[in-house]
Image (cartoon, helix red, strand yellow):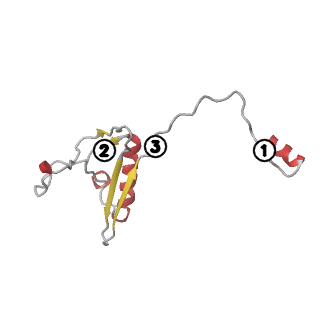
Amino acid sequence: MIGSIKSNIGHLTPAAGAAGVIKTALALREEVIPANVGFEIPNPAIDFENSPFRVLTESEAWPRMPGTPRIAGVSSFGVGGTNAHVILAEPPVAVPSGPSRSKQLFLLSAKSKTSLDAMTDN
C-alpha cells in the first residue's frame, strides 16, 4: 500500500519526513494502515492494475503474520534536493512476565548505617 502524510496535513516542506515517520510508527502501533484522505482518481500514467501497489481510500487492518514483523518504508523527497528513505519495523511482541512472587528482594547500598537508614526511609 502507498500512503502520504500530505493527504492528512498538507505540504510540510522540511518536516515532511519526520511527520511521515510519526504516521508510520503510529500505524505500526495501532495495527492499521491509514487511508489517503481525498484520494479519488489515480494518475493515468501509473499502471496500478499491473503493479504490486495500491492506494487505500479506506483504512485497513494491518494483521501480523506469524514470525514476521510488519515493516514499512518512509521516503522523503525534500524541496532542496535532500532525499531520504527509512525502514521501520514493529518491535517484538512483548511476552507477559510470570506471576509475581509473594516476596521480593530489594537491595540497598550505602557508605554508612546512617546513610542506609535514610535511604531505607526514603
Residue pointed to by mark 2 = 34
Task: Give the image quarter of residue 10.
Answer: bottom left
Q: Give the residue drawn at x 25%, y 41%.
A: 58
Looking at numbered disc 1 in the image, what kind of residue is underneath it? Answer: Leu
Label 3 crowd (10 A; few <14 / some 14-19 / many >=20): few
Say which of marks 3 and 2 sits in front. 3
Residue at image mark 3 = 92
Say few, some or many: other residues with alpha carbon within 10 Å of mark 1 (under 14 / 14 to 19 / 20 or more).
few
| Image quadrant occupied by the C terminus | top right
Which comes before the other along the chain, label 1 or label 3?
3
Mark closest to the chain's N terminus, 1 or 2: 2
Q: From the image, tell me which residue sits under label 1.
A: 108
In depth, the one of 24 and 95 nearer the eye is 95
Q: Position of residue 63 (x, y in %)?
A: 33, 37
* Contact check, label 3 and label 2, Cβ < 8 Å: no
Q: Answer with left or right where residue 102 lies relative to residue 72.
A: right
Type of amino acid under label 2: Pro
Image coordinates for residue 92, horizontal then vertical, percent: 46, 43
1 or 2: mark nearer the eye: 1
State the image quarter where residue 121 is shown. Answer: top right
Q: Is residue 101 above or below residue 2?
A: above
- Three-letter residue code for mark 3: Pro
Q: Which mark is residue 88?
A: none
Q: Secondary structure at mark 2?
A: loop
